[in-house]
Image (cartoon, helix red, strand yellow):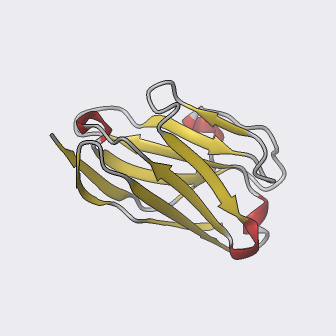
Amino acid sequence: VQLQASGGGLVQAGDSLRLLCAASGPSSSNNVIGWFRQAPDKEREFVSAIGRSGTSTKYADSVKGRFTISRDNANNTMYLQMNSLRPEDTAVYYCAARGGRITVITSSRAGYSYWGHGTLVTVSS
């Protein structure tokens, strides 16, 4: 599975952005997908994840109520809608996929086998 994240940019606090994760490869629409982020000098952290059908989702407490994850399996694309952005949301955002037969959502980085290049989100105050 190949993944490519896009949609990052420079915004002001309170603004919104929508990140996209385009997946390609065999059965790429069947993978559990997660979003992670890494701020400068910090560990990469879990943001959100979505199950294969899109009905199951999970969020980090820091983004709950502000971010929404979704997917369009017909187009092999996953989305992260980010509203009410804060300066502390500034980071490189990565999408990742679990192995194709795994159906359980996890917030653990180790649970994801495929990673794309990140997209930078910068939120100014």
Against 93, residue 49 (above or below) is: above
Residue 106 vs residue 60: left or right? right
In this view, the residue in front, 114 or 32, is 32
Looking at the image, how many numbered discs can be counted on the residues? 0
Q: Residue at x 23, y 39 (%)?
A: 40
Residue 52 at x, y = what percent?
Answer: 78, 52
Residue 100 at x, y = what percent?
Answer: 79, 56
Residue 79 at x, y = what percent?
Answer: 56, 58
Give the position of the C terminus as an image quadrant: top left
Q: Outermost residue, top direction? A: 61
Against 2, residue 36 (above or below) is: above
Q: Residue at x 78, y 38 (%)?
A: 104
Residue 40 vs residue 38: left or right? left
Give the position of the N terminus as an image quadrant: bottom right
Q: Quadrant of residue 75?
A: bottom right
In this view, the residue in front, 35 or 108, is 35
In this view, the residue in front, 96 or 76, is 76
Q: Residue at x 50, y 24 (%)?
A: 61
Q: Residue at x 69, y 39 (%)?
A: 57
Q: Outermost residue, left direction? A: 125
In this view, the residue in front, 109 or 86, is 86
Against 45, residue 5 (above or below) is: below
Against 113, residue 38 (above or below) is: above
Residue 114 vs residue 91: left or right? right
